[in-house]
Amino acid sequence: MERQLADVFSAKVVDRLRAETGYNPRQRKATALCLLLIVVQAYLVGQAMSFARLRALFIPRFGSIRPRAFQLRFKMPAAVTFFRAALAEAVRAVVTAADLRLEGPLASFADVRVYDGTCSRVPPRGKVAWPASNDDRAGAKMLLGYSLKTGLLDEAAIAPETAGELPLWRSLVPTLKRNVLYLLDLAYFDRSVFRHADEVGAHLLLRLKSSARVRVVGHQLQHGYVPLRPWSLATYLSAAPSARGTTYDLDVLWGRGRDEIRLRLVGVSLGGRGGRRFYLTTVPRSRLSAKTMTEVYRLRWLIEFLNREIKQEADLGRCDTADPHAVAALAYGAMIGHVLVRSLRICAALRSHLPLSEIRPLATLHLVRGYASAIVDALTDHDLTAWHRLVEVMSPFVVAVAWEPVPSRSRPRIAARLGASGG
């Protein structure tokens, strides 16, 4: 995996991606490879969205360059295509070589994927290109896709802050993948999404929207499944037990006529004022119990923690440029840096024969950050000797800093218990 990851930053691969995307054809001092490496280094030091910081890192390593000439390398449409292609290449290298699998209750799924949107501030002069919900601000929305099998933030769509999250997700994920479980929030609650998942053999787990009119037609009890004549959910719950910890496993119909779809509704009672939480899913009872399904949905919060990480530690919540192409190119470049860090986490776990779930991602970033310059130096080594030596040196330190064999009470390891090692 170390070699395949380093190959992504080789002149051969970068030149192929550059030729395919038409990026930076003149290839003068600021070559595509140089720019890619500098953006990765900037991510590691937490300043990936700042032209001033990028140029400050570029000059000592590759020589002087005028600010405008440097910035124009990112302000072209081909820059977005190039960095997005480089991200896909890096993810493909890691996924192919690492051969990670889900375990435990989630072992029957090919992957568990989570999507969520987060916003990034853009300078006020970008209000035309990046309209925000507040008239006095400009902002970009980043819709991020996260794999709980690998722990990689592996795809994204970038649009103005006012863009609808569901249409943006549909453009990013035109078709769901077979046997993959998608954990989504209420922004994606739409009957057509469930219908599409059923057609392609994918699986969904979403919170039930209060406005959805579902009719209960059956429930799973301790002694077996019992069909029911259609009841509204409110009527059914009026006669159902509500003690804390009570789980519900129901069959429901949603919609009328040709739009009608049969789904599974699982829920849990929180007791007292906590009320009840319900989740719609396409996962059959033979694969996961109702209690397990309610726990699985808690994994969706991992992308919220990731959003906090990339905003606080890598400064992706604020961009110094208002150019639409530059915002997107720098965001994809920063995600390549994220993949590199998470890949070094995987390397450390494999080298030390430790479960990946016991290596904390944020602590790994803090450790790798100290090697930012050395990592770029090693990736420029043509025979990769320096790279392999550096990974060999870093891996024990990653374990020393990031290994947590027993989770603290304040940080229960739900992902590890359910078998999502990357989370």
Image: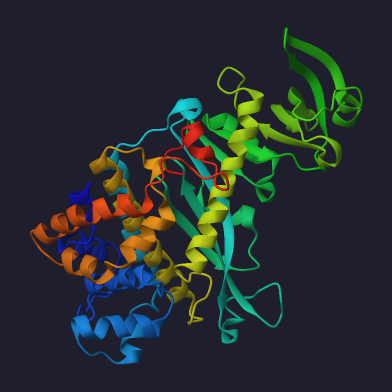
Q: What x and y, as percent, mark residue 58? A: 26, 81
Closer-to-camera residue (7/341): 341
Q: Quadrant of residue 97?
A: top left
From this viewpoint, which residue is outermost toward the top? Answer: 223
**Residue 353 percent location from the top left of the image:** 27, 37
Can you tell which quarter of the image residue 352 is in? top left
Q: Does the image show residue 140?
A: yes
Q: Position of residue 284 (x, y in %)?
A: 60, 22
State whether residue 369 is above or below residue 296: below
Which residue is at the far bottom? 66
Q: Position of residue 250 (x, y in %)?
A: 74, 23
Q: Residue at x 66, y 25 (%)?
A: 290
Q: How many marks?
A: 0
Which residue occupies 30% across, 43% down? 349
Most foreground residue, 290 or 230 = 290
**Side of 60 relative to 165 (left or right):** left
What residue is drawn where x is 49% and y is 43%?
Answer: 407
> Going by the image, does 155 lie left or right of 165?
left
Would you place residue 39 above or below residue 236 in this image? below
Colour option used: rainbow
Query: In front: 258, or 79?
Result: 79
Residue 195 in view (yes/no): no
